[in-house]
Image (cartoon, grey):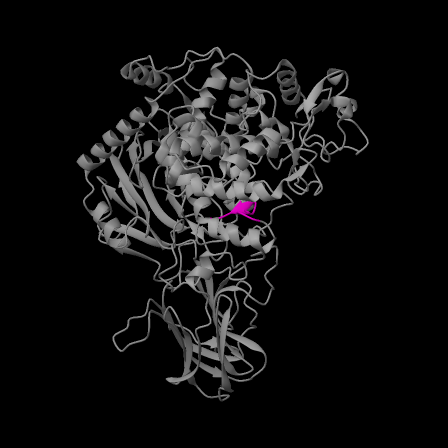
Amino acid sequence: MAQNRMLKNRIFLRQPMALRLQKLLRLGVSVILTAVGLMLALMPARLDAATAMTPGATVARRAWQIVSTIRGTYTRVPGGAPSPALPGGPVLGNGSMGVALQGGPDQPTFYIGRDDFWSILRGRIMPVGRLQLTIPQLKGASYHVDENIGPADLTGRFATSTGSALQFKCFVANPWDVMVLQLHNAGSTPLEITPQLLDGWGTAGAAGMAGQTGRIHWLTVSPETMDARIGEPTGKDPAKPFDGQILDVRIYRGALRPQSRAVFNFLSKTVGNSSAASTRFDCGNLLMPQRAFTVTARVRPTAARGSRAIFSVMCRVDWRGWNEPTPPQIPYGFSLSLVDGKLSALLNRVRVTGLTALPLNAWSRVAATYDGTTLSIRVNGQLVASTHNFPSADEVVGPMWHWTAIHPGDRHIPYDGCGPRGLLAWRVVGAQTPAASDATAFALAPGGAATLVLTAMDDRDAPHLRAESLRLLHGANAGDIEAQWSKHLAWWKKFWGKSYIQIPDKLVQDNYYGALYLLACCSRPGAVPPGLWGNLITSPQMGWQGDYTLDYNYEAPFWAAFPTNHVDLAQNYDGPLLFWMKRGAGLAAHRGFKGIFYYCHLAPAPGWSADGAKSLRQKSDALFASVNCMMRWRYTRDPAYARHVYPFLKAVAAFWDHYLVLKNGIYMDYNDAADELHYPNDVNPATSIAFLRLLYSGLLSMHSQLGLGSDHAARWGHILRHLAPMPIRPAGAVFQVNGHPANQSLAQIIGALAAGKSVIAETQRGTGFANPRLDNGWQETGSSAGMSSVQVIFPGMAIGLESSPSQRAAAFNTVSFSG
């Protein structure tokens, strides 16, 4: 077996469904696993697969023999980061923490992400940060890195023609959120290595965000970190630059008391528009205290006109809530300003303003305090105004789409999927460092070795975040590192030992295992489930917010878990769906529906995705989400799991129980777009019909096994028996094909290959077919919204080997004609 096969697959890409596996290999886990499902559903697979009759030790041994030879080899410097999608290059992960290696030999950079690093204010996932190494002696060096999926590590060598060389090994410890980087000077010249921590924006953060404790260097990071300025607005703050001077801006945790110490202290400059002052002061990226805070300043206004910024720390958010834009004058974050000379404070969408203007050309001390329930402002120590007009916890986590920003101080709001505060920290074990104990750089003599240990924790891991990170690093030694490697290797051997397959096409086989590797890198029990780009997050502007896209992208990566004996990788899948039930019920009621109705794009609790909160004319988003629940039920028949997800599935069914229309003895699905933003008047989309059959049949089997009585079973059975048939039609009768004139049939588009053949149309009436291939080759149609009639076969499981010859033929033709 070849030793250097490239793992070209990457995960969670929004790509069109493709026909040939050779094309699928570069599209991602979700697409690869869809193709594997189609292959298994429609043809007898020639697999030497581990079965229940094979002893476990034999399975484990054979699996390890296979995966230990599979690696991706990179001989060119990877590029593309920071990227709104997945960067090229080798990656690591432990199901919570992900690492993407970028940069050349003289500045290798490890981009660090976490599944739970969601910004509630921005409605998107954010990068944790970076570890950047600067090694001047390796400028122009050759590049060789192996991504070894068996032991889940990276090994590499950088070498120059003048004798400088570095070998390394890197792994993300499983199950700890610790990255271990072992370095060895394999050349004949000394190497000087300077590590630097950067935040998700690629900056060192504001003063006070970074520091050093002994030999441990650390940087406070957060998905809510924002650019802060004195005397000038940030983000979408509606204020203008300040008229006058500003001095002594300080930020405290909680209310201001005599013994309070400022978290941030900006004393060095007078800011304003006088000849002796700068017109603004950029504080850098900082994290406001999340639960309660006080901001104080001294101001000397010279005019009272409009809104003028004293201190601003705000972000840009364009869309929030029920298909309604956030007006540009309502930003998210915090701002302290003068409005027509009167002191004013704005926290997310809540503003409080005093009644009396401050005196001009005189110094006043101003303050704003948020204690978790009330926002108050003071001038020279005197309270001038306050408000507690914030949403309750029930409103924030409920269906009240007009309350879209988090109420930071309410401790009753569950941060089920978000880590609002984190810490990156590192230290070096075994290196000869410069004489000063606080020096950042360290030297490696020829033949010398050192290990850099980095933690990437947040306050979901430990309430006393800094203390726990420092404790882990302070005690790190060579013995601990070796023990972590042994436990890490044992975890991955156990993981691979649960199943194996062997097929003649080794390229497909390698990518099958590569897909499993990537899923295990991005998902594990107890962690927040991965979004569109998993935990391989390199940019603050990830595509589609990196959210949970319910019409295919969120579900597809988990399809690898069930048939491969890795059900535990999908243990976290249901969490966001169950949390959103209250919101879904409110949205359904708002639109006059029953049960629950979900947007296409979700974010973990308590956030809302900033995608615009649209259903994209589809009614099937919650239905598609139920497919994985039914798939797991079919594989496991686990009664505890059935009880866990039954309320969600029952609520999904309640929507369709009342939405479907019984006409001439057939239950019809009207006005349900088969694809994102396609025809709003589509009738009986093939995917919806297939998924409804899966839902109702699964509910009936759950109902029977759990002994839940017959209150719903009769109606579910009636719908299942009288549901509209699958829209199978001759290719010559399929019109309204995506990207082609509405009066041109699929047969005319495909050509002679389609003569006399039937396909699964997208709908009974409306959208005809998605992304057809052309007779002269494959048509690259860009990103598909994910849903297409191919999914009737898998994951819908509506057509398989047990189906009629005509149905199987239509399924084969549908796959063959899809581009």
Q: For this view, does 58 lie left or right of residue 623? A: left
The front one of 441 and 776 is: 776
Residue 458, position as x, y percentages in the image? 33, 50
Residue 182, position as x, y percentages in the image? 29, 34
Q: Which residue is drawn at 30% across and 45% down?
A: 455
Count the labels in the image: 0
Per the picture, the main secondary structure of the magenta-coloured stretch is loop
User: Does residue 554 show up?
Assistant: no
The front one of 271 and 566 is: 566
Q: Which residue is drawn at 19% across and 39% down?
A: 477
The question of residue 517 being in magenta is answered with no
Residue 42, position as x, y percentages in the image? 56, 17
On the image, which quarter does residue 251 sit in? bottom left
Instruction: Specify the quadrant that holds the C terminus.
Output: top right
Q: For this view, does 301 lie left or right of residue 749? A: left
User: Does residue 660 show up?
Assistant: yes
Residue 416 against residue 57 in the figure, above or below: below
The question of residue 596 being in magenta is answered with yes
Residue 82, position as x, y percentages in the image? 50, 44
Question: Bounds of the magenta span?
Answer: 594-603
Q: Residue at x 42, y 11 (%)?
A: 48
On the image, which quarter does residue 387 sit in? bottom left
The front one of 177 and 193 is: 177
